[in-house]
Amino acid sequence: MTAAPAPAPAPPLPSTADVIARPPRLLDPGTCLTLRPMAYPDFYAQYRQAIRNTWTVEEVDFSTDLRDLAERMGPAERHLIQRLVAFFATGDSIVANNLVLSLYRHLNAPEARMYLSRQLYEEALHVQFYLTLLDTYVPDPDQRHAAFAAVETIPSIRRKAEFCLRWQDTVAAIPRLDGPAHRRQFLLNLICFAACTEGLFFYGAFAYVYFLRSRGLLHGLAAGTNWVFRDESAHMAFAFSVIDVVRDQEPELFDAELEAAVVEMIEEAVACEVAFAEDLLGLGVAGLTVADLRAYLEYCADQRLQRLGMATRYGSTNPLSFMELQDIPELANFFERRVSAYQHGVSGTIDLDADF
Amino acid sequence: MTVTATIPLTPASSSPEPSPLWAEVQADARAEGWTAGLDGVELERLFAQTRERAPADADRETLDELLARTAVGWIVEEPDYSKLAARILAGAIAREAASQGVTSFLNSVETLHRLGLGNARALNFARAHAATLEAALDREGDRRFEYFGLRTVFDRYLMRHPKTRRVLETPQHFFMRVAAALAVDPDEAVALYGLFSRLDYLPSSPTLFNAGTHREQLSSCFLLDSPADHLVDIYERYTDVAKLSKFSGGIGLAYHRVRSRGSLIGDTNGHSNGIVPWLKTLDASVAAVNQGGRRKGACCVYLETWHADLPEFLELRDNTGNEYARAHNLNLANWIPDEFMRRVAADEGWSLFDPKTVRHFPDLYGEAFTRAYVEAERAGLAVATLPARELYARMMRTLAQTGNGWMCFKDRCNSTCNQTARPGRTVHLSNLCTEIVEVTSPEETAVCNLGSINLGHHLRPIDGGGTQADWEVDWAKLGRSVTLAVRALDRVIDLNFYPLETAAKSNARWRPVGLGTMGLHDLLLRLGLDFDSPAARELARRVAEHVYFHALRTSCDLARQHGPHPAFPETRAADGQLQFDLWGVEPGEDLPWDTLRRDVASHGLRNSLLVAVAPTATIASIAGCYECIEPAVSNLVKRETLSGEFIQVNRYLIDELRRLGLWDEAMRAALKRDNGSVQGIARVPEALRRRFRTAWELPMRALIDMAAARGPFIDQSQSLNLFVESPDLTRLSAMYFYAWKAGLKTTYYLRSRPASGIAKATVDPANAKPKQRSAEALACSLENPEACEACQ
């Protein structure tokens, strides 16, 4: 056994005060491990909040969905559902991939990476949910295969996937965010997945589910989607809070060019999603038109732009009154459905005389 | 390039020729007076919007549906659209019934009978009194519904053709069917129909579903004793539960007698896996039984606090952990002896036992139980001992995480129960909604049929009144409603089809009924009272006293006519003790209690129990009022049911804001942004902010105090939900301890809120940020205006 080579004389170790004095910026390359003092308590709070929203696919009850599909829905609505399920089959996997390939690599703060780890779990949960949904709705194995192939074979779905993958590829080629060009590229990736994939594609898809739910259809799909929607809303909020931090740290990144690229990206995303709407609603679904969907998507797009601190692009108002329902707290009739409002994590100690 | 220009219009929206059906729709709108009295609605706008979204080949039914749905979408803007949508739906229902040949009440009953849905008694009654009953139908009846109520009736209550699924009755025929089935003569039928049609009183869902049908199971609640501690009995209970579920009953099931994990099984020399695997099987069985296609089965399992499997039991609803030990469809309740609460208070130890070694425990309560418990501890029979507070903390955690694990107090339930006057009678559990408290045994399954008075409909203007301050409770009307209701509830006992022999046997002996109330918050808001004010508490107490008095009065009159219920001599009432006597409370001065006592002493009572405040989830929706005794959970709420989603707004709030000229777009946006709370909206005057606090914003102490004030006049119990936005052990431990000390028999769900919500899809993000006052800040500003350190 040979002895290990004698270590080179080490440079003097930095003191704790030195380390605290030089925290990396969020997009500086590295694997920062410091949680005390915590640089981004807000990210940590979002992580903990997410944990309190834990749910499981087993809690979703699909028992009435099949009857709705068979007895209460016509060909136009069944076509809509078929396409929607095909989109859901692969949508969350694409987001999960980007988390690993882009966000986790480049957001250099352990508390941000904690959040992303949690988000990664949630994306897997969503994939599981939509897989279970697919297996429940589509008994025929060949059709199940077709649903997963849709990302390549159905033009309206393929176009959305290609859009996402294009923005993913541009970052996948960058190992380290050295310099403003790389960082802007990263920001565009982040904005693409938050504002477009989650903020438009998923929001668009949720609108169809909620449209059906407002008519009392597909409770299982709606119940699970409600939880997915809650998760996705949180993911989007996290991404935007990351952007707020970066803007704070490196305001120079946010120039007119970046802004123009964002607008162009969002326009393309809206166009993709409107084309998807034309496909879904192609057979004429009573009570929902492509024009409605387009206005709704434009309205969502404006909201994303506003959240990014940019000028709105469309000036559309939301015509989908059933989406208003999603903004209002639910009062579930417990005989009929499990209340989806519960939380996790209970703290405190017994104190019989405490104020309550 | 704008994206808009590249998108072709869909065939549906580009249809150039409006369907000829639109002329018909417009004619009906005029003929049926869709907008009469609804000042705020714009019919032309509704037509225009709907035309755009209707496929070219839409039939009349599709158009009606779209019109109603579109109108419903505007309820937040203008609540009158709810009534408009209801009128559109009412017309559509009448057309659908007519398409099945149903144009009169007799038509409807004959059709139901021909198809094998209605029973012969209903048919004969309808034929014998056809003219009287038809003349009594109220043409204005359907106009009293809000959309949500009528939609619920249409989707789930109206009888339908077995094949075509078309309705075979209109809402007024439906009310008349139920009234005629419950009445002894046409006069009573007409009177009862009037109560239903005016939405003054509604019986519970099983009665509405099944009255007058070939299988008249009309009772809401069944309480099954614990299976005995062996295999055959455990499996027989599954069958019992399935049979009861099938006909719309909600089930309470005790499990105290079944041995716990690790107990030796004599026949096989193996060890038991405890109750969890049995409950897992029950879970699957409950989910499989579909209540006539109307709703899923529902069951609550009760477990006594000394049972050694309690810690596992408390985890049955967790959504993490071992799926094989989870039962997501079951509700769970704790059946807690006072000794446990005393040890929690004293911070002492608590012992857990295997029922196999303490078979006498479930049938004991009060001092006798405590003695037996201490003896068993001394005899070293305990399986485990742990600090009582540790177990109490687990109970609180289950409540916080699942809303389940309801806290019900065994000794209080027994010591104040009219049925437990003689030894050997024990209340072993409450029911699915914790408002029924009745004795059970292996031979007796307790049953209760329910109905609720709509309190907001029992007001009258003070002379020359008109504004809200000039209303008062119409006590005489309340008395009349109670009398009619109790007679109808009592009649159910004789008509009812009992799925189990043990239920038939028990109900014949005890004849219990459960009359409750709903719309208490409507009543308080119409009188301008804050929910937590002393005046509100006193009014709630008085209402309960009047209901109890008139219920007893009616039951006593029925006893004079038909004789007391067979077990009357074995009741506390026979010993001269009424519910408030058992609470040690004096009644108020409004009512001639002494006369009533004398009459009860001479004639007895037809019913051993009379009053129970049920949650009224569905019937309050039909009546368009707030649920039972509960404060509004929000001023803007989404209701999700099998019929889809609907918004409900607090009309009383809107009326107040309109009066002040404050009900505008900005106010609506603010109300949405704040999830239906007005506490953060500075434009709303202070007094209104106080009055329109939601269940989340009121002090829970006030809810418990109000329930305790009402308690001496409720001989069964109340479904009391408690609301804590972000529950923690400290608050919960104090709250439930207070509830026990206040003498409550039972509590129901702990309601909490989602940890985070969905991003507002329709709220401007610029407005979406500045809110979210923490629950603590809210509680502090509302409950302790003077004592808050944070605000000084």
Image (cartoon, coloured by chain):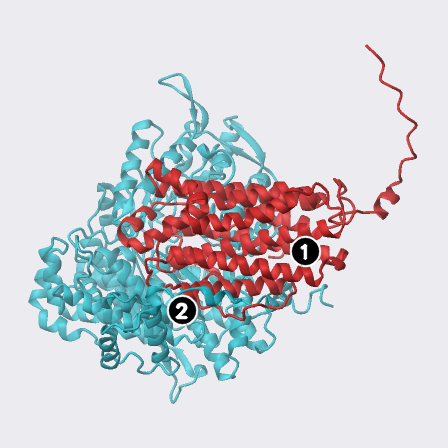
Q: Chain of mark 1?
A: A
Name above or below for residue B390 compared with residue B784.
above
The C terminus of chain B: image quadrant: bottom right
Q: Residues within 10 Å of mark 2 (few under 14, many from 20)?
A: many
Q: Chain of mark 2?
A: B
**Chain letter of the cyan region:** B
What's the distance in space between the residues labelled 1 and 2, CA to CA?
35 Å
Residue on which the image places disc 1: A243
Of residues B317 and B44, the one drawn nearer to the viewer in this rendering: B44
Residue B328 image point, x, y percent = 42, 42
- Which residue sits at x=31%, y=51%? B571
- Which residue sits at x=37%, y=53%? A80
Helix, strand or loop status at disc 2: loop
Helix, strand or loop status at disc 1: helix
The answer to whether one can see residue A73 in this image is no
Q: Amino acid at mark 2?
A: Gly
Residue on which the image places disc 2: B73
